[in-house]
């Protein structure tokens, strides 16, 4: 049992969280987890270990079967549906398959979320340029996704996730579709994002990356946290 829910330095708190799907699958079982502001955490485990289920709970794509989930001081379980968009602006998410809009340019993909949430065109342009500069894509702003390399697509997705200045960035297998050299470029970018103050949670199967960076490792196995250590390693 976590004593101080949603207080102190914790940006993410899971308290005795379980998730059972209608088919009887236990995706998460009795998970207790705290992630502090500024942390860089690798979430590891084999396919089916519960990594994606945990991520879906954090962005309120799903609700736990039992337990409490707090994100940036907000009780996600009891949150009104109308408050979910605001939560998702505080939690940026990057996926393995990029999820870019094919008929929009790099800049339009990055700034789209700001425009649909009521930001002015000028504000959206300024924040888009800031995010593109951060990921090194200012010169590619007018290109379309099919004109980009895999690494550039993922950089665009990272810029989109960061454009609203979230406190937390969740990267779900962000190097899964990339070659080794490009993967390391993306990891270096994520490290820089973390060093600039964004709390980072990265789900990955890539033991080489985990073992090279020696950050905090949270290991899930059959829905349970079996290991949580600083400067951890991972044998996939």
Image: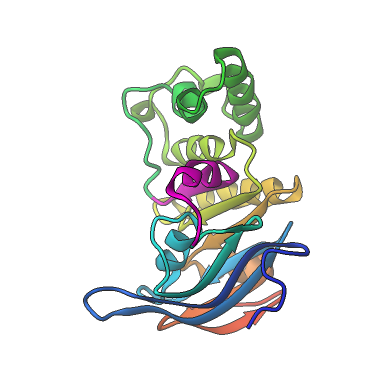
Q: Nearer the viewer, residue 41 or 210?
A: 41
Q: Position of residue 59 (x, y in %)?
A: 48, 54
**The magenta stretch spans residue 89:** yes
88 to 39, vertically: above or below: above
The quadrant of the image that shows the N terminus is: bottom right
Q: Residue at x 48, y 39 (%)?
A: 157
Q: Residue at x 45, y 22 (%)?
A: 108
Q: Position of residue 51 (x, y in %)?
A: 45, 69
**Residue that extends furthest to the top in the rendered view of this protein:** 122
Whether residue 66 sits left or right of residue 210 in the image: it is left
Q: Nearer the viewer, residue 18 or 182?
A: 18
Q: Position of residue 126 (x, y in %)?
A: 64, 19
Q: Which residues are magenta?
A: 78-96
Q: Residue at x 37, y 22 (%)?
A: 104
Whether residue 6 sits left or right of residue 79 in the image: it is right
**The magenta stretch spans residue 10:** no
Q: Nearer the viewer, residue 140 or 169?
A: 169
6 to 199, vertically: above or below: below
For the question of whether residue 212 can be seen, the reply is: yes
For the question of whether residue 235 can be seen, the reply is: no
């Amino acid at each position: 049992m976590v004593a101080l829910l949603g207080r102190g330095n914790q940006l993410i708190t899971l308290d005795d969280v379980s998730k059972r799907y209608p088919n009887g699958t236990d995706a998460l079982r009795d998970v207790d987890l705290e992630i502090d502001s500024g942390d860089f955490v690798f979430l590891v485990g084999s396919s089916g270990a519960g990594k994606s289920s945990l991520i879906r709970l954090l962005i309120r794509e799903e609700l736990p079967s039992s337990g409490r989930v707090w994100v940036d001081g907000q009780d996600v379980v009891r949150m009104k549906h109308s408050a979910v968009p605001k939560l998702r602006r505080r939690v940026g998410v990057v996926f393995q398959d990029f999820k870019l809009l094919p008929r929009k340019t790099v800049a339009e993909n990055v700034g789209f979320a700001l425009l649909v949430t009521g930001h002015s065109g000028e504000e959206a342009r300024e924040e888009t340029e800031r995010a593109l500069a951060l990921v090194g894509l200012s010169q590619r702003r007018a290109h379309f996704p099919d004109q980009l390399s895999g690494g550039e697509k993922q950089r665009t997705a990272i810029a989109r996730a960061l454009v609203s200045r979230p406190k937390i960035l969740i990267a779900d297998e962000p190097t899964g579709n990339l070659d080794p050299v490009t993967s390391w470029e993306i990891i270096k970018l994520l490290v820089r994002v973390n060093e600039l103050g964004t709390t980072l949670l990265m789900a990955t199967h890539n033991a080489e990356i985990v073992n090279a960076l020696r950050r905090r490792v949270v290991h899930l196995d059959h829905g349970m946290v079996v290991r949580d250590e600083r400067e951890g390693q991972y044998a996939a």
